[in-house]
Amino acid sequence: MATVTATVPGPRQRARHWFAGFATRETWAAFAFLSPWLFGFVVFTAGPMVASLILSFTDYSIIQTTHNVGWDNYHHLVHDSKVRSAMKTTLIYTAMVVPAHVALSLGLAMVLARIGRLAGVFRTIFYLPVMTPAVAVGVLYLLLFNGDHGVINSGLGLVGIHGPFWETDPNWVKPSLVLMHLWKVGASVVILLAALMAVPQHLYEASAMDGASKWRRFWDVTVPMISPALFFIVIINTIAALQTFDEVYTAFFNASTPFGTDATLFYAIYLFQEAFTNFHMGYASALAWGLFLVIAVVTVIQVVGSRRFVYYEGDKR
Amino acid sequence: MTSPQGPIATTGEGPGSVPVPPVPVVAPEGRPWYQFPSSASLLGRAFYLVLLTFLTAIFLYPFLWAVSASLKPREEVFDNKLIPRHWQPSNYLDVFRGVPDIATGAPFQRWLINSLYIGALAAITVTISSALVAFAFAYFRFPLRNFLFGCVLATMMLPGAVTMIPVYLIWNKIHLTGTQYPLWASNLFASAFYIFLLRQFFLGIPRELFEASRMDGDSYLTMFWRIALPLAKPALIVTAVLEFKASWTDLTKPLIYLRQDDQFTIPRGIYNLLGLLGPSAGGHGDYQIVIAGTVLATVPMIIIFFLGQRYFIEGIATQGRKG
């Protein structure tokens, strides 16, 4: 058992105490419980990260002999026009989908929070698309947004709008993918609804007493109180959008839809092709680290930018 | 040794002592939805209801469209009528039989079985291993604990692309690419998000329960098995259900690791079908069959969702709460 000493122990004593901690039965038991994860962490996460970094400086391809190529992959990456276009596509899509996702899920959650006991039913309905496999979403996208026969364009035709060729027109691919993605906002609605319901009612009452308008109440009470949940949704969806793969790959990169062109070549898809179709694994590793860097930078910007907006209860700032 | 029979453990401190409080997955800070006061006026509520009904129609439409199209003959798939003019339920049989000349090797029943058992293995292995690890972080005091838990959290943020290639090379090295093992076997080694989720739950269980078990002379493993696991049942179900869904819907891993079509999972199989049946690949555009397959892939998820709705909603809402 830990000995309680009245005096503050010196660094050497603390170090000894710390090392002694490894000898206890409890520590041994703890590491035994941890062993599955420790093994997995070394073999499937930490090891591969190091390996990926090393691979990115080679021309590894499984089949041929591997050479050390120094910074060539990264040099190539910067000048690869496909990388540039794929990154542009991915970033534009992300910039479109994240605000739309947040606005829609917040709107839905706020409506649900106002209708009382029926909220549970609608919440379930909005959640159902989240359960749909990505492949199914890709198939549905392909058929619903079909330029000639798709139901979206038929519907637009009813109100006299001649719908665009969503899937083949490079200008309309991203907006249509955003629309399809918005079908899956349900998880965020659940998170925001839970956050909205946790806002103490008395804050609204106090705010109303001060004569604040509904609009003011939204910005001064609701938004600060749910800001951690909002922030979480922004971060998670940004990271996910930057890695967009499944739906787009299903719709545009199967054996029968060869029109997977520049407009639909997302970064993650290019990475996948380089790694597992062309077996340029060294280059693909460099691409992966490029993606990692972009995600890290975007996340850091969001975290720093959110400091002023996100309010954590019990925060002493 | 006092071994509690049910999930309600008594700690041997006399009757009625510490009847384990129902440990909610969700912290009890928010009101349940049905208690939420509807502050809007009658007119306002009517407006919201109309709006929501309209939105519901939009959200449900793709499902209805898919079910309807899956029952139509090929020529009518795109007629966009919700009630088929000609009913052709045999599409569902065609999914299993395959399409002559084009996709004869479309053993949907195999894919179904593959998806089921891979999903089950993935869910069971990740639940048990993550529970062990989560319990270690929640209960034991040991050096490096915070550092290691920081590593767990860090791996949650790591994009999969970074480790994808070396992990493939590992499976390749031990000659398991082209088999189904890579789809679930790494779940034996726990997964960061579930460790986080389960640890939160274990932390909510009163420590006295574990101490009491230790007093009774239980080993750590017995304590984990007899006390921790039964009490954590709701969180274990959340984990298993979320992972089953993740495995069932995954496309990337099957794309990377599976080669023969009798090994495919349903999403991988549908991806293949979609490619084979399309006109430019020599098919006739038999989308009704692809859609039937899509419906069959989705229905189990809907069923599971309705069975475990509480667990899903709580699991998801917990994600948000960690902020």
Image (spheres, rainbow, N blue to C red):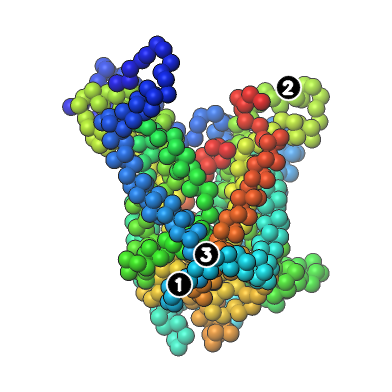
Write down the quadrant of residue A286 in the picture: bottom right
Q: Which residue is mark 2?
A: A206
Which of marks 1 and 2 precedes in the sequence? Answer: 1
Q: Residue furthest left?
A: B1
At 34% from the left and 26% from the top, the residue drawn is: A16
Q: Do labels 3 and 1 touch, CB within 8 Å?
A: no
Q: Residue at x 45, y 82 (%)?
A: B103
Q: Quadrant of the N terminus of chain B?
A: top left
Q: Amino acid at mark 3?
A: Phe
Tell me where residue A300 appears, x and y as whole percent: 64, 45
Q: Position of residue A280 (x, y in %)?
A: 51, 72
Circle 3 residues within 10 Å: few <14, some 14–19, many ≥20: many
| Viewer-nearest of discs 3 and 2 | 3
Whether the residues at callouts 2 and 1 have beta carbons within 8 Å, the answer is no
Figure quadrant of residue A194: top right
**Marker disc for residue A57:** 3
Does mark 1 fall on the same chain as mark 2?
yes
| CA distance separating discs 3 and 2 | 61 Å
Quadrant assignment for the C terminus of chain B: top right
Rendering quarter of residue A214: top right
Chain label for disc 2: A
To which residue does mark 1 refer? A66
Query: How far across and how far down the image is residue B195, in percent?
Result: 42, 42
Q: SS of the residue at dot 3?
A: loop
Total numbered labels placed on residues in the image: 3
Disc with the residue nearer the chain's start (3 vs 1): 3
- Circle 1: element type: loop
Residue A44 visible at all? yes
Residue at x-position 53% and y-position 54%? B159
Q: Are marks 3 and 2 on the same chain?
A: yes
Q: Residues within 10 Å of mark 2 (few under 14, many from 20)?
A: few
* Chain of the residue on which disc 3 is drawn: A
